Image: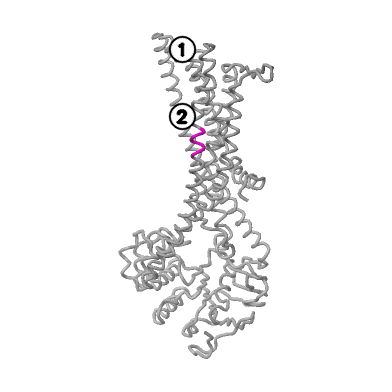
């Protein structure tokens, strides 16, 4: 699974390719071409510096001061152009990275949020751990590492092509006798560099192979640990009321133990790899001088040629040793790419699940109408509701009742297009005329204004109107905090949050309101106040409520009773406030 196989390469290419064919392809290719040119220019400067080595060290050997200072001036010129090229190569590389990352982030966010994928991934596919990390952190690493590793490989290939000829020419032939025959090896330093790099690459691959899987797991463990702390922050009041600090500490340390243990394995493996690569690279410094020194001491080459050979050998050996020097980065890149491609696979799985299982046809209509709707559990066999038929016009109000866990909320999810298991037809008004209120409201991070206009309210609504609304909702204590940005879900009680959710109704005035136990945290007096306000201010809006209290009967005209095992009953509410007509 974790190898560089055809499936991995194909999937990774499918992540890389779209950007380079997108609407931003012109600027992307232009930046890439300039970056490649600058990298090639840097290689060219290195070639000139290699030639400079010969002149500089020969000037030192010959005690030629004039040639020495000429060489110094030449080096300053070369260094100036090298610095300029290196700086702009990095700058444009980062520019391309952030543009590519922005495009990929937009693409992945659309995939994740489209067709309720984010919801179904959580409900039906637990193998997708921490999608937030995959989009924020993994995309960043993938883009930067893909560019840097690709450019590094290109740089190695060009450097090899540039220096192998130089090394071949200046190293000369190696002669030795074997079994009475004289063997001549032309360009022997090139062959020495090749064999040295092949040996190093093989050993590195053997030692470093486990790093791919270890890096993959480390990303997952780190994300799990971080998510556990976020969960505590999101539910801080509940944890504090339960006094669950010791339990949470134990759970966090259990998660961190995975981080610690896996990181320790990475440390050990990188230490083994470090022993080899450090020794490999250090030996590479002296190895060419040792091999070329016999010709120097035989006065066949001067000091300048010896240093030129050493520098050229280093360039060739480094180019051939690209995998040796880049293996930790390659292993980390492989892990990141694996997480992104599995993320895409899981999204595709959910899309297939939606197409395969969702035989519920949802069409647009003026009123709500349900025809032969059957809702099943995820096994696609066990019925929650079987062959439901109902219709509701604007200004009509329906109460959905039944035992806990019998399928009331699932019916609301189905009407919202969230539940894919079942069949039948649902006719719904346009989405901009609908508003769904879950039992626990979602309060986005922002001001109270942002909370109240979420998701489709008017952002230019006046402060006075919001203040009047808050006062009418028994939230007078919040009127001085309208523009205060905060995590309101952590500050307000569940009852206050449900008040704000109703505030959305009164501010946005949808024509169709679906409420799933939206007043469960409120007392009956507050519930009556909200439903009375709803009846007075949105008298022409349809209301579909899920609830357990008999007091809700007086605010609805129809009652849908979910009986279990697929059975249901739809009836008109003929007598008000009678607990006999209510099933809880």
Which secondary structure lies at badge 2?
helix
Residue 491 or 369: which is nearer the viewer? 491
Q: Mark 2 points at which residue?
A: 86
Q: Is label 1 or label 2 in front? A: 1
Residue at the location (47% across, 27% down)? 85
- Measured from the top left, where is residue 114 in percent x and y? 57, 57
Residue 110 within the segment the image draws in magenta: no
**Residue 303, image x, y percentages:** 48, 15
What are the residue bounds of the magenta stretch? 275-280
Point out residue 38 in the picture as x, y percentages from the top left corner. Answer: 51, 28
Viewer-proximal residue among 309 and 352:
309
Image position, residue 584 (x, y; %): 52, 84
In this figure, which residue is indicated by the disc labeled 1? 58
Badge 1 density bin: few <14, some 14–19, many ≥20, Cα 10 Å: many
Please identify the quarter of the rendering in which residue 410 is found: bottom right
The answer to whether the residue labelled 1 contacts the one labelled 2, judged by CB atoms less than 8 Å apart, is no
Q: How many labels does the image show?
A: 2
């Amino acid at each position: 699974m974790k190898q560089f196989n055809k499936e991995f390469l194909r999937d990774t290419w499918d992540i890389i390719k779209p950007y380079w064919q997108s609407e931003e392809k012109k600027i992307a290719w232009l930046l890439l071409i300039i970056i490649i040119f600058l990298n090639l220019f840097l290689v060219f400067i290195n070639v000139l510096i290699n030639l400079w080595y010969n002149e500089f060290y020969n000037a030192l050997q010959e005690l030629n001061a004039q040639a020495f200072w000429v060489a110094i001036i030449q080096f300053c010129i070369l260094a100036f152009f090298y610095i300029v090229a290196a700086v702009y190569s990095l700058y444009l590389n980062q520019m391309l990275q952030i543009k590519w990352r922005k495009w990929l982030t937009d693409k992945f966010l659309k995939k994740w949020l489209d067709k309720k994928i984010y919801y179904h991934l959580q409900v039906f596919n637990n193998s997708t751990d921490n999608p937030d990390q995959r989009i924020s952190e993994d995309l960043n690493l993938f883009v930067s590492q893909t560019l840097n590793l690709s450019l590094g490989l290109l740089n190695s290939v060009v450097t090899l092509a540039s220096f192998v000829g130089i090394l071949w020419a200046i190293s000369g032939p190696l002669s030795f006798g074997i079994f009475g025959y004289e063997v001549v090896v032309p360009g022997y330093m090139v062959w020495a560099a090749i064999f040295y790099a092949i040996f190093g690459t093989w050993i590195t691959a053997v030692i470093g192979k486990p790093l791919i899987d270890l890096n993959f797991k480390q990303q997952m463990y780190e994300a799990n640990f971080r998510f556990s702390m976020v969960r505590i922050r999101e539910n801080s009041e509940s944890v504090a009321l339960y006094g669950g600090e010791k339990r949470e500490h134990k759970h966090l340390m259990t998660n961190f133990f995975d981080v610690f243990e896996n990181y320790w394995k990475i440390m050990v493996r990188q230490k083994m790899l470090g022993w080899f690569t450090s020794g490999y690279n250090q030996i590479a410094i002296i190895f060419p001088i040792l091999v070329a020194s016999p010709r120097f001491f035989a006065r066949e080459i001067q000091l300048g040629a010896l240093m030129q050979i050493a520098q050229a050998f280093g360039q060739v050996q480094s180019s051939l040793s690209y995998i040796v020097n880049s293996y930790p980065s390659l292993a980390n890149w492989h892990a990141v790419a694996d997480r992104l491609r599995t993320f895409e696979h899981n999204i595709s799985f959910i899309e297939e699940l939606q197409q395969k299982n969702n035989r519920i046809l949802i069409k647009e209509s003026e009123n709500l109408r349900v025809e032969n709707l059957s809702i099943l559990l995820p096994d696609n066999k066990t019925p929650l509701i079987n062959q439901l038929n109902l219709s509701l016009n604007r200004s009509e109000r329906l109460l959905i009742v039944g035992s806990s866990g019998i399928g009331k909320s699932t019916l609301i999810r189905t009407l919202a297009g969230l539940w894919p298991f079942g069949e039948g037809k649902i006719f719904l008004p346009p989405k901009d005329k609908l508003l769904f209120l879950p039992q626990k409201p979602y309060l986005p991070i922002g001001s109270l204004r942002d909370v109240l206009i979420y998701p489709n309210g008017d952002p230019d609504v006046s402060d006075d109107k919001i203040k009047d609304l808050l006062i009418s909702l028994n939230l007078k204590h919040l009127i001085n905090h309208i523009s205060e940005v905060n995590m309101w879900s952590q500050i307000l009680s569940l009852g206050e949050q449900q008040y704000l959710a109703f505030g959305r109704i009164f501010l946005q005035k949808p024509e169709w309101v679906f409420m799933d136990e939206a007043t469960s945290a409120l007392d009956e007096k507050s519930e009556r106040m909200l439903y009375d306000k709803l009846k007075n201010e949105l008298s022409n809006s349809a209301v579909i409520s899920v609830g357990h209290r008999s007091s809700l009967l007086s605010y609805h005209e129809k009652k849908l009773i979910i009986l279990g095992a697929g059975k249901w009953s739809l009836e008109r509410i003929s007598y008000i406030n009678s607990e006999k007509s209510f099933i809880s």
